[in-house]
Amino acid sequence: MNILLVGAGTETSELNVALSEQKHVIQAQLAMFAPSHLDMFDFKTIIVVSPEASVQVETLVKAVEKGKRIIIVAGVSDGLAAWAAGANIPAYAYPLSGVDLANLLAEIRRLEAGGGGAQDEQYRKVLLGGDMAARIQSQMSARKIVVTSPKGGTGKTTVAVNLAVALALSGVTTYLVDADANAGALQYHLRLSQVKTTLIGLLRRMAESPHKKTGDTMSAIAAGSVYLSAFTPIEELPTLRVIPGMVTDDLGDIALQNEDVINSTIKGLFEAGVATGGVVIMDVGINPSHPIHRAALSSAEAIAIVIKPEIPDLAETRRWIARMIASLAGSVDRASAVQFIGSRVKICYNMVIGDEFKKVHKILQNALNEDRINISVAPNGILPFVDPNITAQAVNSDNIDDILVWRYKKERLPELAVFTESLIAFAAHFVPAIREGAARIGLLPGQQKKKGILNRN
């Protein structure tokens, strides 16, 4: 593992030797740790020997924001030890005894293997504080979310990705799945070059799994573990995990003909993510009758329909809702299908300029009434048009944190202020406490970042 060691005394030097003997790579041993060092060295873990180091908690917080793992070596009365205890950060007594050194090395091995404790919990407690972290995780009105659209070109995937990033930045453990059976682009938005698996890969695996129909408790646990292990963690944001979707070469795959496996896999992904206290967002394609889309829509607690405030989008939304009701009516009566859709649909207008969406939204409601679809739709999300140069960079640059809401947090671009605030307002339909979390981390325009657990007192 690549490690940054912070400390300049005898204990730090002896730890350096022990780590090197274990074949870990010490990127640097510094007496002082400053924000500039975060981008200067390639490392995954920081070990701070507090009595021999100069470091500010605020700098360590920046490291956690960037997905770095922290280990503290400090005396019992050291303020950094108290901070570590409250922030779910591994801490060992100074000076290191033989047992403590062995435990520290074991902790690093667990981290290297992808374990060693919940990094998302550390992120929440460090950035938000314990009380806020608990509130964010417990106060959710919908944990199974589908983002879809009746036609292409509406910015559906952009909304899905930014919604997931906004939730994750605000402390919510978020699982994002590209479930677009027409071949999605999520992996490009998130700059995924290496992944654990894709959705089509998982479907193939589950089709061959001996656990898929046994129904006993241990098999359910094993299947849940398979689902969670399929997600690729985003190193720069510990609270976000992703499963990319299919490419065009996958569209004729035999796994897409096994509807039982599709249903159980989609349901399993939702259930596994929710079981960890997280939110699962599935980016679903335009055809509600496709087995993957139908499975996702049927399991969803909320369905975000992303459209532009334009007549073609409204016409397709009208047809999409009718098709979805017809599809569900195959297994339940029409009234139940209408109720199911009406209670879950959240209309999100994207690329809005001014207030013209009000007129077209009224047209949509009147059209549904004409179709005798007794659904009262409201504009739950109103996302403004964003400069095309900025949206292009959000996908095309080399930096994952150029995703719109992430970039706003990083650079506070005025051009992204209204978009970010509007997205947080939309996200509050699913996680009401997100506004508090977003304000705490400085994601909301006009809000000052609060310290939460950052004080060492």
Image (cartoon, rainbow, N blue to C red):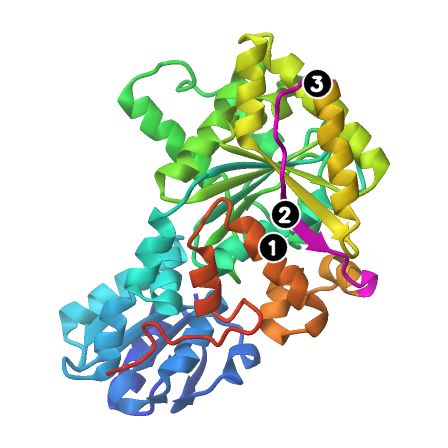
Q: Tell me the residue that label 2 is attached to.
A: 381
Front one among 244 and 111: 244
Q: In which quarter of the image is residue 24?
A: bottom left
Q: Position of residue 278 (x, y in %)?
A: 41, 45
**Which residue is rendered at x = 28% and y = 75% of the image?**
72
Mark closer to the chain start, 2 or 3: 3
In the image: residue 93, left or right of residue 249: left
Q: Tell me the residue that label 1 is attached to.
A: 423
- Secondary element at tag 3: helix
Determine the CA span between mark 3 and mark 1: 28 Å
Looking at the image, do the residues carrying marks 3 and 1 touch, with CB atoms under 8 Å apart?
no
Looking at the image, do the residues carrying marks 2 and 1 touch, with CB atoms under 8 Å apart?
yes
Q: Residues within 10 Å of mark 1 (few under 14, many from 20)?
A: many
Please name the amino acid that badge 1 sits on.
Leu
Determine the CA span between mark 2 and mark 3: 23 Å
- What quarter of the picture does the C terminus occupy? bottom left
Q: Where is residue 47 in the image (x, y as percent from the top left)?
A: 34, 76
Determine the CA span between mark 2 and mark 1: 7 Å
Magenta stretch contains residue 377: yes
Q: Quadrant of residue 146?
A: top right
Residue 122 visible to an observer of this rendering = yes
Please name the amino acid that badge 3 sits on.
Arg
Mark closer to the chain start, 2 or 1: 2
Q: Which mark is residue 93?
A: none
Q: Tell me the residue that label 3 is attached to.
A: 323
**Which residue is rendered at x = 53% and y = 9% of the image?**
332
Numbered disc in front, either 2 or 1: 2
Report the magenta residues as a range: 371-389
